[in-house]
Amino acid sequence: MDRRKMLALLGISPALAASAPAYAGTAPRGIAEESSAGSDGSITVMNPAIAGKLATRAPLVPPLTDLDNKLIYMINLSWEGPDAANYFYGAMTEWLQKHYSGVKTVVKVTAEGMFGSDAAILKEITANHADAVIVGVAG
């Protein structure tokens, strides 16, 4: 079972589990001997930082002048469960329809959850020429 899903089912935020301290211990006999451990029991640690240049930046699109007659996708990343953001997105849809004429909203739940990229939704957004996308609101 996926650890993040298990934590979500238990009602525990993965961020809390990630912030738990980790304690180092000595390696079991045989492992330290085969690794790059020195005679004093120290080990070599590799730096996990990414070396090299940053990703190429794409320019931001210009902001919308208004939301009248616009198509807005609302993407639920299932943070706190698949239905957590539905109340918020429902209230936001009502507010947008009350204040802007012809605005249309589409709410989608990602298949990949909060840590993935749902190619089907990205394809749908592109094919329908969405004017705006709201992503990742928790309930």
Image (cartoon, rainbow, N blue to C red):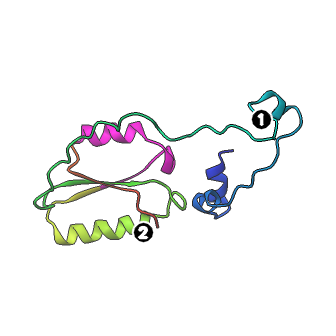
Along the line of sight, the residue nearer the viewer: 78 or 58: 58
- Quadrant assignment, res 27: top right
SS at badge 2: helix
77 left or right, relative to 74: right
Along the line of sight, the residue nearer the viewer: 20 or 45: 45
Q: Decide which of tag 1 and tag 2 comes sooner along the chain.
A: 1
Res. 38 mark: 1
* Residue range corresponding to the magenta coloring: 106-128
Along the line of sight, the residue nearer the viewer: 16 or 116: 16
Q: How far is the residue under mark 1 from the one under mark 2? A: 57 Å
Per the image, is 4 magenta? no
Q: Dot 2 surroundings within 10 Å: few (below 14), some, or many (20 or more)?
A: few
109 left or right, relative to 27: left
Per the image, is 113 magenta? yes
- Quadrant assignment, res 128: top left
SS at badge 1: loop
Residue at which label 2 appears: 87
Hey, what amino acid is under mark 2? Tyr
Name the residue at the front extreme.
Answer: 40
3 left or right, relative to 114: right
- Is 55 above or below relative to 74? above
Name the residue at the top extreme.
Answer: 34
41 left or right, relative to 113: right
Q: Position of residue 89 (x, y in %)?
A: 36, 64
